Image (tube, grey):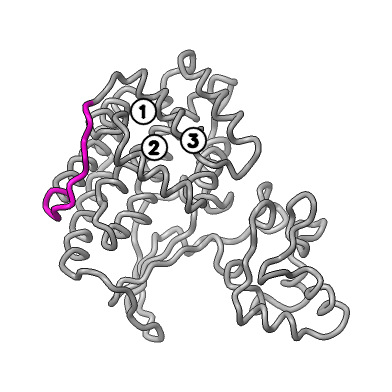
């Protein structure tokens, strides 16, 4: 089986105690059954601590929503006591993600991780392949549709990686490619008439306010940015490489998922919508005085955490992108051309 990943994945390293937004805080951490069974069998004082800290195959978070094994140095006591090989599956994998498509597998690192976000924003996009003979095929889907989607995605990559094409125009072309593919696979998406771009950008932020927040500071932050949008400075061209790499990350990670439901245009819209939002958040940060690389990486990470890493929020957002009159392809193109 072929395993395909973005080239920057090979450089990823967890920064452990140096992470300012640890994945061991604020998340429910489920334990796979094999690992949970092992934890229940561990002897001694540490085994007793494990059993007291697990309920219904999940770790019992502390009052401040930390994993009970995240120590004061920001390190994992399970890792130090039992070894990396005995971490549960989610802790071992995160922020890596994987998809299987019969004869090949794809994977990457998620934007919601601080260290991953820095790599994604700073690294030119390319794909690497290796053979993994010990894995077998999986998945039930239409092979012809998958072949079409691979061609469509390759066309999108060619447009997005061509830096002679301005990013706004490249994303407009991506939407056109997706719309053509949507018509071809005969799962048409309802397209409502466009509205004005000012109302459209306000609607984008209203949409974010409808999602269920993960961090309690997210909604006040989004509302504050929405208020500042009218006076925020124009988009900074220094941010364009970061936004282009975010778009490539999203197309790579999500477009092939439409092999299961045919919603190729929805996932392309999600990439465009995300770039519009993150670009606006960069502008709002710049209005405070400065928005350099670290600030850009943190903003992208926070957006990913709140949207990508909530199944409920992703489902609701994709539905809004399908049905809201504010998110037609024409409106998204207008917002792209006006706002980034």
Q: Nearer the viewer, residue 127 or 197?
A: 197
Choose mark 1 or mark 2, whichever is in front.
Answer: 2
Using the image, determine if residue 277 lies above or below residue 182: above
The percent coordinates of residue 158 (x first, y second) are 23, 49
Q: Nearer the viewer, mark 3 or mark 1?
A: 3
Q: Residue at 44%, 61% (x, y): give it.
A: 108
Q: Main secondary structure of the magenta part?
A: loop
Per the image, label 2 sits on a secondary structure element best described as helix
First reached walking from the N terminus: tag 3 or tag 1? 3
Q: Which residue is rendered at x = 27% and y = 38% of the image?
A: 171
Q: Residue at x 67, y 53 (%)?
A: 22
Residue 277 locus on image (x, y percent)? 43, 33
Outermost residue toward the left in this view:
184
Residue 340 is labelled as 1
The image's mark for residue 275 is: 2
Instruction: Classify 10 Å Cα crowding around label 1: few (below 14), some (14-19), many (20 and above).
Output: many
Image position of 294 with respect to 91: above or below: above
The tag earlier along the polypeptide, 3 or 2, is 3
- Secondary structure category for the residue under label 3: helix
Q: Is residue 100 left or right of residue 224?
A: left
Query: Which stretch appears magenta?
Result: 182-193
Taking the view exactly as shown, the residue that stands out farthest to the top is: 231
The reply to whether the C-beta atoms of the residues labelled 1 and 2 are less than 8 Å apart is yes
Q: Is residue 118 magenta?
A: no
């Amino acid at each position: 089986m072929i395993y395909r990943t973005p080239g920057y994945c090979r450089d990823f390293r967890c920064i452990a105690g140096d992470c300012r937004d640890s994945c061991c805080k604020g998340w429910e951490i489920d334990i796979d059954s094999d690992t949970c069974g092992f934890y229940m069998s561990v002897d001694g004082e540490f085994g007793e601590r494990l059993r007291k800290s697990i309920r219904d195959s999940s770790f019992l978070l502390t009052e401040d929503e930390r994993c009970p094994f995240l120590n004061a140095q920001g390190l994992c006591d399970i890792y130090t006591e039992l070894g990396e090989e005995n971490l549960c599956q989610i802790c071992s994998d995160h922020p890596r993600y994987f998809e299987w498509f019969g004869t090949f597998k794809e994977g990457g690192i998620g934007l919601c991780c601080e260290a991953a976000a820095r790599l994604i924003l700073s690294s030119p996009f390319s794909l690497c392949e290796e053979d993994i003979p010990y894995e077998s095929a999986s998945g039930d889907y239409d092979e012809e549709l998958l072949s079409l989607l691979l061609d469509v995605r390759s066309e999108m990559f060619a447009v997005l990686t061509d830096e002679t094409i301005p990013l706004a125009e490249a994303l407009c072309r991506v939407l056109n490619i997706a719309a053509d593919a949507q018509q071809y696979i005969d799962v048409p998406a309802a397209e409502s008439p466009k509205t004005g771009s000012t109302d459209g950008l306000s609607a984008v932020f209203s949409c974010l306010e409808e999602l269920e927040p993960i961090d309690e500071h997210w909604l006040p932050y989004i509302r504050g940015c929405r208020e500042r949008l009218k006076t925020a400075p124009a988009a900074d061209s220094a941010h364009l490489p970061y936004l282009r790499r975010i778009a490539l990350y999203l197309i790579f990670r999500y477009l092939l998922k439409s092999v299961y439901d045919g919603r190729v245009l929805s996932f392309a819209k999600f990439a465009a919508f995300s770039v519009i939002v993150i670009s606006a958040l960069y502008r709002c940060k710049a209005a405070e005085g400065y928005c350099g690389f670290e600030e850009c990486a943190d903003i992208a990470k926070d957006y990913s955490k709140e949207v990508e890493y909530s199944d409920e929020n992703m489902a609701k957002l994709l539905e809004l992108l399908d049905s809201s009159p504010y998110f037609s392809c024409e409106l998204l193109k207008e917002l792209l051309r006006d706002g980034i």
